Image (cartoon, coloured by chain):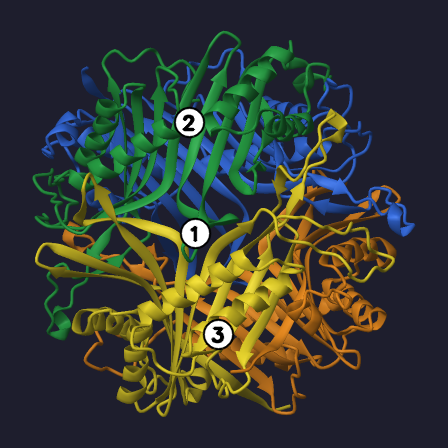
Chain colours: A orange, B blue, C yellow, D green
């Protein structure tokens, strides 16, 4: 039997870089977690341990920090594009780079009438994400967010589904719908302002969640993706992963109490998980964008 | 050798209760994690397995959900006080109750000009906490918060410390100071409005962090506690646990780059941990408040 | 612009099922976390909220527990195969099922000379995993493990790599090599005994890690995959994801102490991450096996 | 109102030190997470930011690593005792030191007939813990373990408890009893061999769990503590925190299936939590041992 090396990549993960920019006494910060994954002809290091084609992961780490100084961090996407291009262009043995980024947002601490110019509090509402690919000829960018937890306390139903011998669920005509939004969206053009593009897409997701009268979490998912595509011309595909954070109505009848959707048990596991893609009919081929 | 039972308690932990209140079409939600711990004369259940003195933890769970319906949740503190009193007063075998609560805050989703009346997004900035004790005669309340991450990008120094044979640290005259605030504060009187009291104390912590020119994280800790006590007459003691979230200046000189406190590596472990109490001279005895 | 629904799936995740089998007074347990994901023509539920094609995730959960009773759990793979086939065969609207499983191992508690027949302690060394796909015509099985942490305290070097302007790493001729093995392997035939097959593959991974004199973590990765394929004829592809758990030699020279690879700092982030596939030249097409 | 500084401490937490000892080609490793907390007259650093009394946490970290070289790590307890004594004895401003330690166990990887002399796999069954206090005059040692998950699939009942208006629980005459053992024990004398003492106490906990026919988890808790005290003369007090990891019998009757304690849902939250101390009548005063 003959054995061979298949697809592979390697890199330095979770470089936590914080960049402070100072304009007079006013500071700005960007706080990223950057992971690099490179690939190319890496047969030697796998088979013989010959490392002549290997740019060490330690060097990749150094590059992340040096680039933060040399180029600043205008956005996760722009920073990822610079890094990915650098690795592919500067190293003959590297023919593909993926840079994955998380961004943690900070707000200024407000004191009295004004803001503190160099004091910040972390805003943990969601984590912004980006993935950038560069293969020497093209670049691809996917932006996203995760950990954004939302809830509608009414305006959701679920009925009309298949009943089989294992079905015990009662149909619901008014229920809580809650989920933790994990979304990513693919760009077909580079927006002028990555931060504005991010905020536009994020707003679409929240608004569509709030405004959709929902007959299934799938319907809400589709509405959220649809809203982003309808609103943001630079985006051609949205992928969503929505865990159904079940809020069960507690049966209070043993205690002589009614419960008209007022008291819920927020359960952990198991949970429904709804995943789907919404895309433009004319979206270009995704290539490696989602890898 | 003779063996005996020492201090003990038991209860149901992490009851995740969500309470929706509806005024016309406008919904409000409170989202709590409630843990109950009861104690009394429990020798029998430990030594012979006789459970005549035991109120089952399952019943405690039911009580949490039933009380959410019967009494509503006006605040974590008020809800905890009700529950603790109930267990001690209704069960002859229970002479002490502790109720620990976490609250997760939600904001309305803003759509266009207005708010959605039943749509919410979780605001993860910090977790609000409360601990209530009731021994049949008295009640004690400790309020707090955790996971509130703050950073000053300048305005911090550290020098003049002991040097011994294991010291290698360089003195710092301008450094980043960042921490994750874990604070709890003890009340000597019951405030009219627990939510307002919480927000006042939270604001004091943030403002003192931002406004203190810091020569040590200890100095910042003391200033934070002091500010709360100075501002909130209902509070007599503040306890803080502040991990020093180290942001190390990256040495970029090998690459011919200066780094004037612009690029940092945000490290995980090890970390400094500064813990301390700040209290009023005339604070009453804490009793079991901090247990 | 026209918008359409792309690939999607839905199901109940993290059904924690524990199955006890009793032979006389001797009990056996299997402890699984089962996640189901189904797909088919789900346009209606996404676009109009019509649920006529939807088997509720609640029913999927019930099925997992009912099958544990009806069929027992002989192995994660066999249990996953049964479930996946059931969903596709019993529901006309479902044309593809994926069942993902984690298994937590338990050992008997040994007391004195013998074992306790119904007393167990959880063995947390690794989590066993399985993924099963069924599309109505074929089934695919991937088995794996995660969280298996291994370390060689010598027998590892790293040198001969690319140096560029961002390189500061010193070449290493004797270093600690540690990783957390995350591995999955694809079967081309169904083994007689899934548990034996699992243990064989696991042993190969450990032995190859221990016996490989390593010039790069990539070389170790390839050796591990190669060993599995060489030893287990039912397996045609191995995919490995190996974080380099860096153990840095602490510089003790400021204290007048040598450190001949005796004292290490076990770092968290950043870390190298090496990912790769090793497969047989004649491995059949993977189809959806890895999705 | 006058405000003052209350109890405080500071130190470096989570120093992850791995120590390799080499005897010929045979290596041994000990893998610790060490946290130091010091206290003394620290008014100045809190109130004025004067650091003349402060031994930096960075120096504490260096000391941990240097001591690992100079003294080796014969056990977590012995290493903690050395460190705590050092800080108190060498620094006039430090009058109390607490050293908290976690140890992660490793086993040799077995290959064929023999063991690999420098290859290890981490054994995650439990984390061993130790806490050492030194106040200049005395030292105290508490040893423990956490994350040890155990289960009896029969031999447990629960009935005869209080019923009130919120009680719905059915009495149980055969149930699964599972918990995650978190235990700590206090020494009144220093054992000759800390590792042997640890293994003895651990064995007692497991055996008592397995051999106790249980009418309540409290009864099991007491039996576990009692067994340790009965067996290990160097130990005078045991504290246990036992979450009741509920395994609910799944109701399969809607599917026409019986469930004679064969299929369980392993739930996450809420959970019962049983905490208690078992001690010798003549145990000396605990002093700061448990702080």
Residue in front for this viewpoint, B221 or C18? C18
Q: CA distance from mark 1 to mark 2?
A: 69 Å
Residue sitting at 8 percent across and 48 percent down? D173
Q: Is residue B33 left or right of residue D96?
A: left
Q: Residue B190 has which mark?
A: 2
Q: Are marks 3 and 1 on the same chain?
A: no
> Label 1: few (<14), some or many (≥20) within 10 Å?
few
B124, above or below D284, in the image: below
Which residue is labeled 3 in the image?
Answer: C230
Image mark 1: chain: D
Q: Which residue is most to the top? A: D137
- Classify the position of the C terminus of chain D by image quarter: top left
The image quarter containing residue D53 is top right
* Up-down relation of residue D225 to residue A250 (above or below): above
Quarter location, residue C190: bottom left
Question: In this rendering, which labeled residue sits more in front, label 1 or label 2?
Answer: 1
Closer-to-camera residue (C173/B255): C173
Residue C144: image location, x then y, percent: 43, 67
Task: Please give the name of the residue rendered at 34% of the width and 62% of the height, measured from the top-left corner.
Answer: C103
């Amino acid at each position: 039997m003959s054995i061979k090396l298949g697809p592979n990549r390697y890199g330095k993960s979770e470089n936590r870089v914080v960049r402070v920019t100072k304009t007079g006494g006013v500071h700005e910060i960007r706080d990223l977690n950057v992971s690099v994954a490179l690939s190319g002809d890496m047969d030697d290091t796998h088979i013989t341990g010959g490392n002549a084609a290997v740019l060490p992961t330690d060097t990749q780490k150094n590059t992340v920090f040096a680039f933060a100084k040399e180029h600043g961090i205008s956005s996760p996407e722009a920073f990822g594009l610079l890094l990915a291009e650098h690795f592919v262009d500067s190293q003959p043995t590297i023919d593909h780079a993926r840079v994955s980024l998380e961004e943690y947002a900070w707000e200024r601490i407000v004191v009295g009438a004004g803001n503190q110019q160099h004091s910040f509090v972390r805003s943990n509402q969601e984590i912004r994400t980006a993935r950038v690919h560069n293969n020497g000829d093209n670049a691809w960018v996917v932006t996203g967010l995760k950990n954004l937890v939302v809830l509608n306390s009414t305006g959701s139903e679920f009925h009309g589904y298949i009943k089989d011998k294992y079905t015990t669920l009662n149909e619901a005509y008014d229920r809580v719908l809650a989920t933790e939004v994990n979304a990513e969206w693919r760009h077909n053009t580079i927006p002028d302002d990555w931060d504005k593009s991010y905020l536009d897409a994020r707003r679409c997701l929240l608004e569509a969640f709030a405004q959709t009268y929902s007959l299934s979490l799938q319907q809400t998912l589709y509405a959220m993706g649809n809203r982003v595509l309808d609103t943001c011309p630079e985006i051609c595909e949205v992928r969503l992963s929505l865990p159904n954070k079940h809020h069960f109505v507690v049966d209070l009848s043993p205690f002589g109490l009614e419960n008209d959707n007022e008291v819920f048990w927020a359960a952990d596991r198991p949970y429904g998980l709804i995943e789907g893609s919404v895309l433009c009919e004319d979206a270009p081929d995704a290539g490696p964008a989602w890898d």
